[in-house]
Amino acid sequence: MLKIMATKTEQKVPKWFDGQIYPKGGIVTNPYSGQSCELNALELSIYDYLKGCESMGLAAELGKCLEWFSRNNVEAYYTLLD
């Protein structure tokens, strides 16, 4: 099942994010549920950063990413990260 995300408010790059902002977004699939979401460029950039933090055990940075998603794209948060 593919869920298309529509952002109604302008998202801002968080001050703590020092990663690369991708030029385009993409579709991300939750490996456990099989559900997918289309993320815009900023969301995809932060999602990939989040996954890197998760794999490296950076709990504080991971928490910032999760909080950002919960406030900026709650549907993607519940589909991909919950």
Image: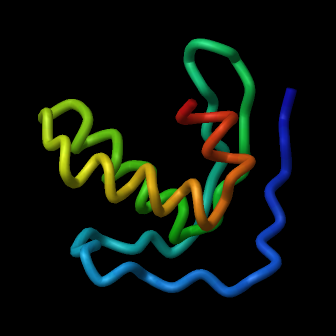
User: Residue 78 appears at what percent x and percent y?
Assistant: 66, 37
User: Residue 49 appears at what percent x and percent y?
Assistant: 31, 53
Q: In this view, does 26 lie to the left or right of 66?
A: right
| Quadrant position of the N terminus in the picture | top right
User: Residue 32 appears at what percent x and percent y?
Assistant: 58, 13
| Quadrant position of the C terminus in the picture | top right
User: Residue 11 appears at what percent x and percent y?
Assistant: 60, 81
Q: In this view, does 34 lie to the left or right of 77?
A: right
Indicate whether 80 appears above or below 61: above
Q: In which quarter of the image is residue 35?
A: top right
Q: Nearer the viewer, residue 79 or 64?
A: 64
Indicate whether 48 appears above or below 45: above
Colouring scheme applied when the structure was drawn: rainbow
The residue depicted at 82 percent of the width and 78 percent of the height is: 8
Q: Quadrant of residue 18?
A: bottom left
Q: Quadrant of residue 16?
A: bottom left
Indicate whether 55 appears above or below 70: above
How many discs appear?
0
Indicate whether 50 appears above or below 15: above
The residue depicted at 13 percent of the width and 35 percent of the height is: 56
Q: In this view, does 35 lie to the left or right of 49?
A: right
